[in-house]
Image: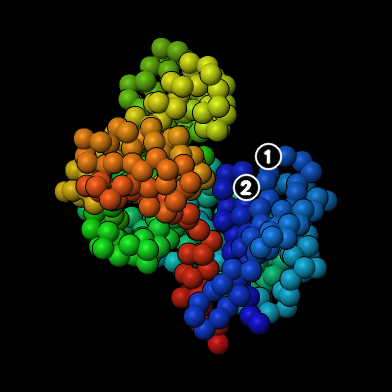
Amino acid sequence: MKTLLTFNAGSSTVKIGLFALHAGGPVRLARGVIDFRHEPLTLRVSEGEQRIEVALDARPDADLSGILSETVAVLGRHFDLGEVAAVGHRVVHGGDHFAGPARLDRESIAAIEALTVLAPLHQPQSLRLIRAIGSVLPDLPQGASFDTAFHRTNDALVRRFAIPRALHDRGIKRYGFHGLSYKYIAGELARLAPEKAGGKVVVAHLGSGASLCGLDNGISRDTSMGFSTLDGIPMATRCGALDPGVVLHLLGQEGLALRAMEDLLYHKSGLLGVSGISADSRDLLESDAPEAREAIDLFALRIAGEIARLAATLGGLDAVVFTAGVGENQPKLRANVCGRLGWLGLDLNPIANAANAVLISTPESRMAAFVIPTDEEQVIAEETVSLLGSAGK
């Protein structure tokens, strides 16, 4: 049986997928994750109800070949990797160069590296993985799936900032992210509720990183993240949309250095910054501290406001979808958001919401609300197969 490996590189973790290649498409066999925030590094793999946890001897460094070599060896003890046909990667930024998945060769890797200036936290990790796989498994073809590609259907007006045209022409524009997640949700909604999927839908991808996307008949028309993954709604530790005057003030009047500013906006703001307690919304929802409540209320307020803004782009709203770790598993937050959308005709079913049901709105609601788990690795696998040929090849 031929198989496929996928790597989903974040700023501090790498998610791994193992898929069997069938005529009907890739089918997941197992999922794994390596968290680079803690040492020793640990590879956690799940296959159905089975859980595997292995401490790795390799240490994180500039070259991930040692970690990848050990990871492949561990996977090989539990799964047949002799028939791996290809490897697929998530790459955060495709800029205007990549409008869809790409087979990785010297030219495409150079183009990805040239975009590092647009995604300095995420792009280098993807490149390290791509090169490490090329070293550990040199004969395997590799493909890249881009988070930005799904939003290339946004209108040129939506993508433009009100800055001098010369800067726009140099690439300072709205790109959008979490595209693999939105592509998966668009497909799942079409399967679960085709009558809604054909209309105007806002998807809220709420995780440690968070954004929203407005879909019209499954096509991205607008999204909350813009030039960077800082934009849009507040996140676990990222600020979301911020008056540029604040940045100018902190750099000028407060004398903050550029790296300190980057650290503040990416790692010390968001839920963590507002609450002063935790970046984890679960901790904040359980806390009695007024700062925790304020952080959650601000998060919900901005999400609801962004849903309304995206509805303006779409010219209406037929459904809202909650997805990703927070969106899929936190009924209290969903209730907070939906309670702010009653004026749009959203009526939440509290029993269905508490149970994390797929449909959480009432029959009387003028728009539907759904909870749909996302699966970025599935999209990577499917796009890699589309690049490299069917399982039979």
Residue 153 appears in view = no
User: Residues under labels 1 and 2: Cα distance?
Assistant: 8 Å
Residue at the spot x=42%, y=61% of the render?
Answer: 184
User: Which residue position is annotated with label 2?
Assistant: 13
Q: Is residue 179 above or below residue 101?
A: above
Q: Position of residue 47 (x, y in %)?
A: 68, 63
Q: Report x, y in % for residue 41.
A: 75, 46
For the residue pair 72 and 227, the one nearer the viewer reads as 72
The type of residue carrying mark 2 is Thr
Image point (55%, 27%), residue name: 286
Using the image, determine if residue 26 lies above or below residue 110: below
Q: Secondary structure at mark 2?
A: strand
Helix, strand or loop at mark 1: loop
> Quarter of the image containing the N terminus?
bottom right
34 displayed left or right of 318: right
**Front in this rendered view, residue 115 or 203:** 203
Identify the residue under disc 1.
37
- Colour scheme of this structure image? rainbow
Query: Residue reaching furthest bottom?
Result: 392
Q: Is residue 85 visible?
A: yes
The one nearer the camera, 366 or 36, is: 366
Give the amino acid at mark 1: Arg
Question: On the image, which quarter does residue 343 sit in?
Answer: top left
Q: Residue at x 79, y 53 (%)?
A: 54
